[in-house]
Amino acid sequence: MKPTLAALSLAAITAASTLVTGTASAADDPIVIKFSHVVAENTPKGLMAQKFQELVAERMGDRVIVEVYPNSQLFGDDKVLEAMQLGDVQLAAPALSKFGRYTKKLALFDLPFLFEDLDAVDRFQQSEAGQGLMSSMEKKGLIGLGYLHSGLKQFSSNEPLRVPEDAAGLKFRIMSSEVLEAQFEALDATPLKKPFSEVFTLLQTKAIDGQESPWSNTYTKKFYEVQPYITESNHGLLDYLVVTSSYFWNGLPDDLRAELKAALDEAVAYGNQVAREKELEDRQKIVESGRTEIITLSPEERAQWVQAMKPVWKQFEDEIGAELIDAAYASNRGN
């Protein structure tokens, strides 16, 4: 039987109380922060986590120890939030798609063709509306600490995808997201919710026909080696939310919490710069590999994809909020 949210919250309160009590009674004992994530060390998220670890070591000495666990070594994104509320990890950075159990608002970021580029994403995330979303789960025991880019998503597949009809009947791996499910259903394709750690094998064995990822994940996880086609669609966003348990975070001494937040802000800014650079670098590495054909859509072809997927916005308008969708869309340079 899965633990209830109330049980998880109670466990988290107990864990946080133990942490604060332990720190008070044994001042020389360091606070250990376990940072769990699912991607490789050389991705924007992986490098951000390492940067945070280094900054904390430099600035806080042996008061705080950050342990980083990449590649789903501790938990996958589907389990890490429950583990966080039980006190088993203190930091994670799941994809924004992973928070549906806690809030419907963050599903905004899964809407297809909502943002033109990462500059538009930045403008919205730094706005009052974007910043407000990070505290939307506090009553559920989670606090967002920063948005982290991975990049805009491309389709990879066993078949060339130039127009929406080309995706009909194909099986695509998705994260656990009702919006992403609806996105592929709008193409008459079959979405399959599978852990990120299984994607390469699923592609290699042709158990699925394709997937969607930014260039950095497609390169570092070697998806391009087992997918003959990549369509440069920029159709969606894969971003993460660096998140912690509200009980852990609010249980820290004020001065220590401020120092940790400053280090994390610096690490996130570094990770976001890496994400921009790796979009270009990893795309070029895939081109140079010669292992896959990159399909560039004409304006007319891209317009067909937009037309096919745009109804998904209306489908989730009541859950996400029309005003929030409008605010995000307005962040594009032409609006």
Image (tube, rainbow, N blue to C red):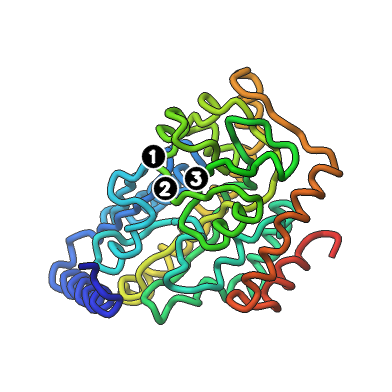
Q: Is residue 249 above or below residue 44?
A: below
Q: Is residue 136 above or below residue 287?
A: below
Q: Which residue is mark 3?
A: 173
Q: Is residue 306 visible?
A: yes
Q: Is the C terminus in the top left, top right, bottom left or bottom right quadrant?
A: bottom right
Q: Nearer the viewer, residue 226 or 270?
A: 226
For residue 291, above or below residue 36: above
Q: Amino acid at mark 2?
A: Lys
Query: Where residue 282 appears, x then y in whole percent?
Result: 60, 31
Comparing 181 with 92, the one in front is 181
Q: Residue at label 2?
A: 194
Quickly name the residue at label 1.
Answer: 198
168 above or below 137?
A: above
- Residue 153 position, x and y percent, is 62, 45
Q: Is there a contact, CB below 8 Å, between mark 1 and mark 2?
A: yes
| Contact (Cβ within 8 Å) of mark 3 with mark 1 | no
Residue 209, given in percent of the width and then of the height, sits at: 53, 36
Which numbered disc flags the more N-terminal residue, 3 or 1? 3
In front of the other: 253 or 292: 292
**Front tag of 3 and 1:** 3
Q: Please name the residue shown 70% across and 56% down the image.
A: 309
